Image (cartoon, rainbow, N blue to C red):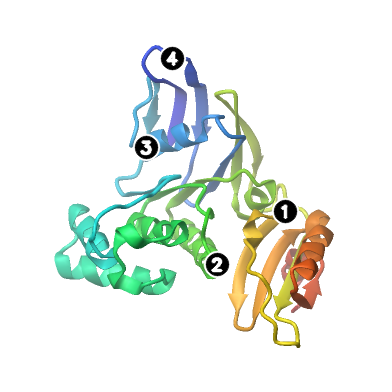
Amino acid sequence: MRLDAVSKRYGRGGWVLRDVHAEISPGDVVAFSGGNGAGKSTLLRILAGVSRPTSGSVTGRPTAVGYVPDRFSPQGRMSALSYLTHMGRIRGLPTRTAAQRARQLLDRLSPAGGEEAQLQTLSKGNAQKVALAQALIVRPGLLVLDEPWSGLDASAHGVLAEVMKEVAEAGGAVVFTDHRAAVVRAHATRSYTVRDGGVSAGPTGPGASARPVTEVLLTCPDSGRIPAPLDWSALDGVVSVSDQGTTTAVRVDQACSDALLLVALRQGWSVAGLVRDADGLRRHGHGR
């Protein structure tokens, strides 16, 4: 898939994007990073086919595209299962197949309230889970994710990472935006920076921009007091978060690990374990 000289503006306003060139290949996980207002969301809408460029061309877009927008605010009394089944039927699946696929995705993502939760009652994080499920209801050749980690709980962080890997390994491509450099380094095989409407290429290939990552295992203290919940993903340098039974594993850019530990201890968490350069140890075949 190629973007050649893609530019975008709305009406007679200023240019949101100008002369963008980018390439996305099967198996790629591509990150577009940049500050607020840089044009990332507009670019992703063009990639997904939701918006057309004012000038330039997009070629090679796969037939099956899954798109998760930066804001997904579903309304109405329709249940999550009914909504996803309906979306599957729109995408060409038989009703029974669509319902089966919807149940599999809801079981995997575990939104609060389960499959019968009404869309209008969903929190931001649970709405994000349904948004991800609708993007996957038909297996995508291109998965486009706009700030996909926003609002997700720790268990869903791990599922999202697995989904991105599965799509790429199946020969699809994944495109995502995130403002955190550590997340881009952890997940992207190719990266671009969006700034002032322009796009510049970053490092290419797995590990091209890798930096040491520390894995911190956090648990409740022996006193039994439950510490205050934290949005770990909002802290500087956090790459991923996953629940592991009684512990929460937080992978963080090594340069930011001391700051994360300080926050965790102040909020009443206990440190059950810590592995410096966790990715490096795994690459060399060592366990935790």
Mark whose residue sits in front, 3 or 1 = 1
Q: Are marks 4 and 3 in contact (CB under 8 Å)?
A: no
Mark 2 and mark 1: span between their CA atoms? Answer: 17 Å
Answer with mark 3 or mark 1, whichever residue precedes in sequence: 3
What is the CA distance from the residue labelled 2 to the residue labelled 4? 40 Å
Q: Position of residue 33 (x, y in %)?
A: 60, 39
The answer to whether mark 4 and mark 1 are in CB contact below 8 A is: no
Check disc 1 and report the residue beneath it: 237
* Location of mark 2 (residue): 158
State whether residue 15 is above or below residue 283: above
Q: Which residue carries the number 3 mark?
A: 60
State how far apart marks 4 and 3 are (Cα): 29 Å
- For numbered disc 2, what is the local secondary structure? helix
Q: Amino acid at mark 3?
A: Gly
Where is residue 149? Give x, y as percent. Answer: 54, 55
Q: How many residues crowd around disc 2 within 10 Å: few (fewer than 14), some, or many (20 or more)?
A: some
Alpha carbon distance from label 4 to label 1? 36 Å
Sequence-first disc among 2 and 4: 4
Q: Amino acid at mark 1?
A: Gly
Residue 178 location in percent, x, y?
58, 45
